[in-house]
Amino acid sequence: MNGNGKMLAMTYAVEEAMHGYVSRVADRPTAEELHGMLAYALGWDDLAGDEQARGKRIRPVMLLLAAEAAGGDWRKAVPAAAAVELLHNFTLIHDDIQDSGYLRRGRPSVWHQWDVARAINAGDLMFVLANLAALDLERTLSAEHALAATRLLLAACIRLTQGQHLDLTYEQRNGLGMNEYWEMVEGKTASLLAVAMQLGALTAGASPETQALYYEFGRSLGLAYQVKDDLLGVWGDARVTGKSNESDLTSGKKSLPVVYAMGRASRPGVAQSLAVVDALELAGAREYTQQQAERLTRAALAALEQAAPRGEAGKLLFGIAASLLEREN
């Protein structure tokens, strides 16, 4: 099986597993709408008419690749991959509510399609299903490894909520230091990809040292992913990203270009118009942000090289990491 075939097989396995967990919601006629909300959030309906609605499924596929690259059978890691993707989509549902985001993946967000109260409830349910998926590792691994994986996932949830809290809090702040920015994004974005990579290695029975290297690979790559996202949030094509270019700027979000420009606000013309793209360019924010994305990607690749991933799966991990830097959405 070539690389594309392997990743398609992995994606299909994750989709099938998630369908199984979400179908538990449809155990009675009165739950039809709730089931439909989860299916919508996961991109399984026909409203969008294309694959954009489902997202990239990068985290679960990379988890499965890490499992194989670390010497394991990726099929045994499918419950963990499903758990990570369900958890990711739970955060998106709640994030859109907290940010008043009208669009997600090029179509109305869950809360905008229904309402805030029901969207919160649907997100809560997605969170529960993610934890049930993690516990199902008992079916493919030892009870000890399943419990360890669940604990890792829950620890990542703590970091996710801490990062999101900082993100929301910093919207009200005029000044923000670079260290504060990195702490925020390490929690809200990098922590989930980091634990996904560690979970893949754990399911393969890798040593703690190897698990730590996969974790660092995911952490650095997650930071690079967020930095690239910040770049696209200002300078990306909204038709490709599925998100308005103005949303982060007008909502007070402290993305890396904005934080960098704020630190250089003494330069003439910058302090008066930080929300203006031209001002960010003037401050050198675009170039700096691109440089940081490249630096973090190099750090991720270095950690992965130390982990000595095996076979085709290892090559695919290197390729995905490099390609994320070039993405346009």
Image (spheres, helix red, strand yellow):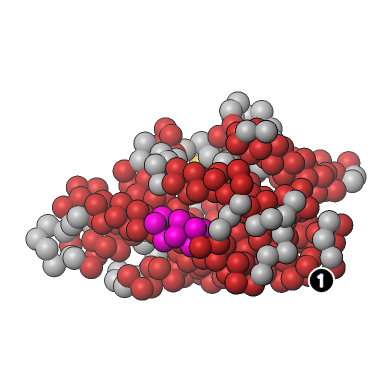
Question: Position of 31 compared to 302: left or right?
Answer: right
- The residue drawn where x is 38% and y is 73% is 180
Q: Quadrant of residue 144?
A: bottom right
Asked whether residue 247 is in view, the answer is no
Query: Residue pushed farthest left?
Result: 268
Could you tell me what secondary structure mostly forms the magenta stretch?
helix
Q: Is residue 62 above or below residue 303?
A: above
Residue assigned mark 1 = 144
Q: Is residue 169 above or below residue 133?
A: below
Measured as percent of width and height from the top left, residue 107 is found at 54, 36
Q: Is residue 286 above or below residue 210?
A: above
**Quadrant housing the C terminus:** top left
The residue under label 1 is which amino acid type?
Glu
Measured as percent of width and height from the top left, residue 149 is found at 72, 66
Q: Element at badge 1? A: helix
Q: Quadrant of residue 254?
A: bottom left
Question: Position of 131 compared to 100: left or right?
Answer: right
* Residue range of the region highlighted in magenta in the rendering: 297-305
- The residue drawn where x is 48% and y is 66% is 186
Question: Position of 283 compared to 134: left or right?
Answer: left
Q: Nearer the viewer, residue 103 or 230?
A: 230
